[in-house]
Image (spheres, grey):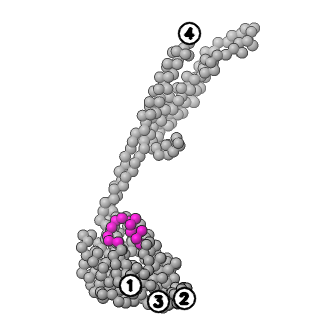
Amino acid sequence: MLYDWFKNIDFAYPWAFSLFLLQPLMIYWYFTRYSRQQATITVSTVTLIKKTSSWKQTFRHSMLVLRLLALSCLIIALARPQTRNDEELKMGEGIDIILCLDVSGSMSAQDLLPNRLEASKAVAAEFVDRRPTDRIGVVIFSGESFTLVPLTTDKHILKSQIYSIQRGLLEDGTAIGDGLGVSVDRLKSSPAKSKIIILLTDGENQGGLIDPLTGKDLAKAHKIRVYSIGVGTEGYAPVPSSDGRGGVVVRQQKVNIDEKLMRLIAEETGGLYFRARDNESLRNIYGEIDKLEKSKIEITTLKRFTERFFPFALAAAALLLLEIILRYTLFRKFP
């Protein structure tokens, strides 16, 4: 318990502990003086005297112990033990970000591990952790689009909702234009000076009410940068599907990403296009976007100290008072 207490203590004047070097000098001086004061008596009945003792003789050095304890407490008090509470105030200009994620059936492809959707969720959650002052929202799309989380700074809710994303929540398809349009709608009235969309998909535009180029023009009109990510390896990817008898079979499916469209959306809105062929490249892409879109943050650290020397000063005074009382009462020497 005492160890745990000292673990959380800082000392304002740690040099005061050098005063502990006085204690060996005090002990030496005490025993040198004590030995000089002892009278040498030679009598024939010395054996009888040796057998005779009293409680005063047993506790004859207790005054020294009390004085050393008082000095120890006084030295600790002089070192000014303190408990410190640090508080960080983060102020700055955050960025408003929408994570626009494809949740279509093809996101179950296993060219990323364990599959594209789960890999995308894990990396998106890591990205959220790296943006402490930004407002972030989540939009999901397949054959239609839906706002999963409006812009918020509550990272716990964001990550919880990201991890809860499952395929089949929406009609199947790849409505890139709808996903982009809903994302723009969430950002267009934002007062933030910097607004971005991270658009992640693994296919070509199929269905939806909004053409992807219209979504691109909307983003451009509202000065929203779009970073687009195409997820999937080259050629073919293993995709689990039903075998018609209640089982699951893995089939090879061609990877079709409209890179020309994705690159056009990114370039005309001031963003960049990336291709994620595996888990590591996807993680690196989010890391690159994190570096490109830096928030201006001012961190003010407040340090509050609470003095803890008083109990030691009080203990030192009490021990010295006890020594004085005992010296002039129970251990009083008569001439």
The Cα–Cα distance between marks 4 and 3, rounded to whole angstroms, is 106 Å
The Cα–Cα distance between marks 3 and 2, rounded to whole angstroms, is 26 Å
User: Which numbered disc flags the more N-terminal residue, 3 or 1?
Assistant: 1
* Amino acid type, mark 3: Val
Q: Is residue 127 visible?
A: no
195 vs 310, left or right, is: left
Q: Residue at x 56, y 8 (%)?
A: 335
What residue span does the magenta drawing correspond to?
149-162
Give the SS element for disc 3: loop
Query: Can you give x and y, in whole percent of width and height, for residue 30 in the image?
Result: 58, 23
Decide which of 130, 181 is in the foreground and name it.
181
Query: In this figure, which residue is indicated by the disc labeled 3?
Result: 255
Query: In this figure, which residue is indicated by the disc labeled 4?
Result: 334
User: Which numbered disc flags the more N-terminal residue, 3 or 2?
Assistant: 2
* Amino acid type, mark 1: Glu
Q: How many marks?
A: 4
Query: In this figure, which residue is indicated by the disc labeled 2?
Result: 245
* Amino acid type, mark 4: Phe
92 vs 174, left or right, is: left
Q: Residue 296, relative to residue 118: is it above or below?
A: above
Decide which of 268, 40 is in the foreground and name it.
268
**Tag on residue 171?**
1
